[in-house]
Image (spheres, coloured by chain):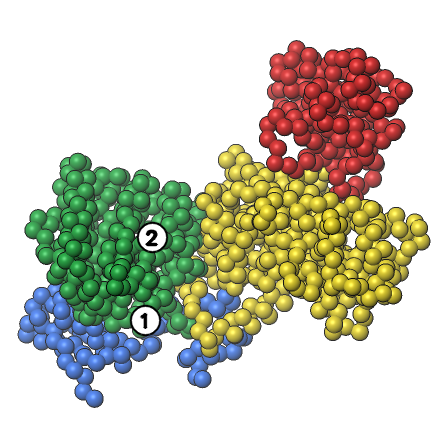
Chain colours: A blue, B green, C red, D yellow
Amino acid sequence: MPKDQGLISWKELAPGMFILEPGNSVKFKTGDWRAYKPVLDKEKCIKCGMCYALCPDLCYEKDEEGYFICNLYYCKGCGICAANCPKNAITMVLEEA
Amino acid sequence: MRPELKDFKGFNLKKLPEYDGFAPGHRACQGCGTVLPLKLALKALGPNTIAVSATGCMEIISSPFPYTSWRVPWIHVAFENSASVASGIEAAIKVLKRKGKISKREKINVVVFAGDGATFDIGLQFLSGALERGHDFIYICLDNEAYMNTGVQRSSATPFGAHTTTSPAGKVIKGQVTWKKNLMGIVVAHNIPYAATASPAYPVDLMNKVKKASLVNGPAFLHVFSPCPTGWGCKSEDSVLLAKLAVETRIFPLYEVIDGKYILNRKIDKPKPIEEYFKLQRRFRHLTPEQIEYIKKRVDEEYEKVVKLSECFGIES
Amino acid sequence: MIEIRIHGRGGQGAVTSAELIAVAAINEGKFAQAFPSFGPERRGAPVQAFARIGEERIRTREKIYHPDIILVLDPSLPKITKVTEGLKENGVAILNSHLSEEEVRKILGDYKGKLALVNATKIAIEEIGVPITNTTMLGALLKATGLIEVKSMEEALKERFGKLAEKNIKALHRALEETQIYKGV
Amino acid sequence: MGKRLAKEVSIAIAEAVAQCKVDVISAYPITPQTHIVEHLAELVNNGELEAEYMPVESEHAAMSACIGAAATGARTFTSTSAQGLLLMYENLFIASAFRLPIVMVIANRSISAPISIWNDHSDVMTMRDSGWITTFAENGQEAVDLIYHAYRVAEKALLPVAVNIDGFTLSHVIEPIELLDQELVDKYIPPLRMKYKLDPKKPITMGAIGVPEIYTEAKKAQDEAFKASYKIIVNAWKEFEKLTGRRYQPVETYQMEDAEVALLIMGSLAETAMNAVDFLRKKGKKVGLLRFRLWRPFPLKDFLRAIGKIRALGVIDRAVSHGSTGGPVGIEVRSALYQSNKRPKVVNFIAGLSGRDVTVDDFVELFEKTYEAINKKPKFSYEIYGVKE
C-alpha cells in the first residue's frame, strides 16, 4: 500500500498521530467524483461571488480579471453553483468519458 | 445593544476575505449543506481560531489520516464533549494569558462544530455546562436533522414526520412522531450574550452572525440549518434551495437573541407552501394530508412565538 | 502506641477532636494519625473518630478495635451504644456526664476500669455558648492521660480556630480543673 | 527541606498540586476525593494559586476539559473516584493517545452496585489498559511525593499519570507530612513546554481518523512511548532522592532478603501488612512483603528481581475480575512469572473490598495460607478472603 494512503512506519508518526501540515487535503483529488462539470458563461457573469460563497468544496478561485473559476481538481459536480447563480451563467455539463 | 457589537461591520459578498480555515480536498458528499456553513464560519473567523469538532460527518470528512482539511489548529476528542473540550481550551488561553505565556493582545477564537446528535442529544449536558460557566467561545450546531454519520438515524432534531432509519415511514407509524426539540429555547435560557439561527442560503448573514458571536464576550451559540442531500433524499444541487425554502416556509426562522432580546431577521408575511419544501425530499414523501396539515399549523404556531418574542422587545431587524 | 476512639454525634466535632489530638502530638514531634469513621451518617447520628499517637512511625491502617482511651462527647451515647466495647483493661473511659461515678458505672454495665468524668456540656455552654463539647473533652483527655502537653493543645486550637480559639482554650482549662478521675474497681 | 506538619492527606495533595503551579483544575465532586478539589478551590479563591478553576458539570466534562486545556499547553489537574472514573472512561484512552501530560488523583473507591463509598481498587483496575502511567501511594507522604513526581514524569514522557490513594484510609487521614520547599519543586518541575499544541501560529490537527492502514502504527508508537516511560519514571525518582533523600522504587520490598514466602499488596494496606511480617519474623518465619508502587508500566524486571528465592507468593487483589483466573494483579503476576525461570507457587486472594478492614491478624492468616501452597496445590485459582459463608 502506498504511503499516501497512510501506511507509514510508526517511527515516522508525530506523537499522538497529530497531523502537522495544516490543510494538506489540498493534495487530495476529489474531482474524480464528478459526473457533471460546471461551465461558466463569462458573458452572463457579473462576478457577484455567489458561486464562491456557496461552493461546499471550496473549488472557486478568483482569477486576474475578477471571474470566479472552478478548480476541477476538487469539483465534485454537485451543481450548487449553477442552481444558485443569479444570472444563470453556470451550466452543468456531462463530463466526457 | 452590547458594546462589543457597537462598531460591527458586516461582510460584503463581493469582497469576502480570501482566507479559508478549511481546505478543499475534503471528503464530504456532493452538495453537502453541512460543510458549506462550516466553511463560511471559518472564513468569517479567520486564522486566529482554534476549532473543536464533535464526532460526526464533518470530523470524518475532514481528517482521514494523513490528510487534514483544517488550516486552523483543530481537535476532535469524542462525540458528546466538544463543549467541555472547548471550555478547557478557553480556560487554558485565559490563564496562560494571565501568566504571560500567550500574548494578552492576541484574540483567539475558540469554536465548536457539532452536529444535531452531538448537540441536541448526547452533548446537551456538556453544552449546558459550558454555557452556564460563561466561557468565551462559539458553539456552532450544524443541524442536518438526523445522525447522518451513522446512516440517517433519528435525533431529537429530526422534524415531525420525517423518515429516518430509526423512525421509518411504516404502515402504522409514519416517520418521526415527536416535534423538533426547541434547542434555541434551551440555549437562550442560559442567559448567554449571543444566540442566533443561520442558514447557508444566506451566506453573508451567516458569516455576520459568526463574526458577532466571536465579538461578544462570553458564550455564543449558532443553530445552523444544514441540508443533507444523502440523508434527506434530495438532489445535490438543491441543498441551498432547501435551506432557503425552510426560511421562506417559516420552518426555520432566522433570528438573533442578544442578551435575551429576540430580533427576527427575516419576517415571512407570505410563507411559501410547505409542500414545495417537502416534495424535494424523499424523507417526507410518505406524509399524509393530515400530517401535512398538522405540520403547517404547528410551524405557524412556532413561527408566531418568535415573532411575538421579537415584537415584545420592539427591536426592528 | 496509644489508640483513642472518640464517640460523638454527627456535627459535635468528634472528627475535629481527633484531628486536634493528632496535630498537637505531631507538633510535639511525635507520630500521630487521625481519621473519621467513614459512614453515611449525617448530623445527629452516633459517629466515631479515631486517633493514634506513637513515638515511632505509625504503620497500621487498621481500624481501632482495642482502644487505650475512649472519649465520649455526648452524655446520652453510653445508653444507646456500648462505648467501652474493646476498651483495654488498663485503659481509660473519659465521659461527658453530670452523673456520679456510681451512676455512670451502672450505665456502662460491666466496665471496671479507670474512669474520668466531667460535665462538659455545662462548661461548653458557659464558656463557648454552644453545647459543642469536643474541645472541653480534650481538656478531660489531657487531665486523665497527660498524653499531650497543654501548651501543644492550645497551639493546635489556635491554629484550628483562630479568633474563636480563646473561648475553646478557656473551656479546655476548666475541664482540666473540673475533671474527676476514678480508679478502676 | 519542608516542615513536618500534621495534615489531612487530601489537603496536602492539594497543596502539592498548587506548588506544581497547575494552570487549569477541573473538578467535579465525588466522595472520597472531594477534599482535594475543595482545598484547591479555596487556594484559587484566596488568591494563593494562579489557576483557572473549572467547576464542571460531570467527571466526563472534567476529563474533557483537561484534554482541551492540556492540548492548549496548560498544566492540568483533576481528581475523582469510582463512578466518576467510570464516567470519564472513554476520555482516559484519548488523553493518553494524544500524549497529554494530565495528572489525576484517584481516591480509590469500590464501584457500584451495590453503591458503596468505601475503599478498594475496583475503580482503577478498570483503567489498566488505558495507557495511563499508574502509581499507588502507601501513606500520606508518598501521596504528596507522587504528585511532584507525576508532573515531572507526565511532562517528560508526554503521558498522563494517575496517582492512586486509598479512599478514606488515606484521603481522610491526618498524619505528619512534609511538603517540599517551593524552590525545590520549581527545580524538580520545570515550566511546561509542549512541542505540539493547539496554537494558531503553528496549526496542527489532533484527533484525525486512524484508518486501518495507520491505526496499528499509531498504537505501536503509543505503546513504545509508554514502555519508554519506565526509564523516565525511575530517573525521576532517582532525581527526587538526590533532592530530598526520599527513596522510591517501582517495587518496594520489606524483609525480602531471605524470605521464603511473601505477600504482594498495593496501596496503604501494605503498611498494616508490615506489622504482620514483623510479628511472624519474631516467631522465626521467613516472610516478606512486596508492594507495587508502579503498576503501569508494569515493572516486570523489578518484580522478578524482588521475588528473590521465595517459594510461594500470596497476591492480594482488591478488585474482582468476574469469571477470570484471578484478580487483576494476580492475573498479571502469574503471566509475568510464566516467562521466568523462577516460579514460586502463586495464590491469589481478593480482600479488603469496599473498606472491609484487613487487619494484622488477617495478614498473618494470609501468610499461613500462602505457606500451605508450597506443598499443596491450592484448590482455587483465587479466593475471596474473609467472606461470610
Asked if residue B311 is positioned above or below residue C123 in the image, the reply reads below
At a point 55% along the width and 49% down the height, the residue shown is D83
Can see residue C163?
Answer: yes
Asked if residue C166 is positioned above or below residue D94 in the image, the reply reads above
Looking at the rendered structure, the secondary structure element under dot 1 is: loop
Front position in the image: B154 or B6: B154
Looking at the rendered structure, the secondary structure element under dot 2 is: helix
Of label 1 and label 2, which has the lower sequence position?
Answer: 1
Where, quadrant-wise, is the N terminus of chain C in this rendering?
A: top right
The spot of residue A2 in percent (x, y) is 43, 84
Is D33 situated left or right of B169 in this image?
Answer: right
Which amino acid, by three-letter code, is at mark 1? His
Chain bearing tag 1 is B
Q: Residue furthest top?
A: C126
Is B100 situated left or right of D311 in this image?
Answer: left
The spot of residue D106 in percent (x, y) is 60, 49
The spot of residue D278 in percent (x, y) is 87, 49
At a point 62% along the width and 13% down the height, the residue shown is C129
- Nearer to us: label 1 or label 2: 2
Can see residue C170?
Answer: no
* Residue to which mark 2 is pinned: B120
Of the numbered discs in the image, which one, if any, rests on residue B26? 1
Q: Residue furthest front?
A: B172
At a point 83% along the width and 63% down the height, the residue shown is D373
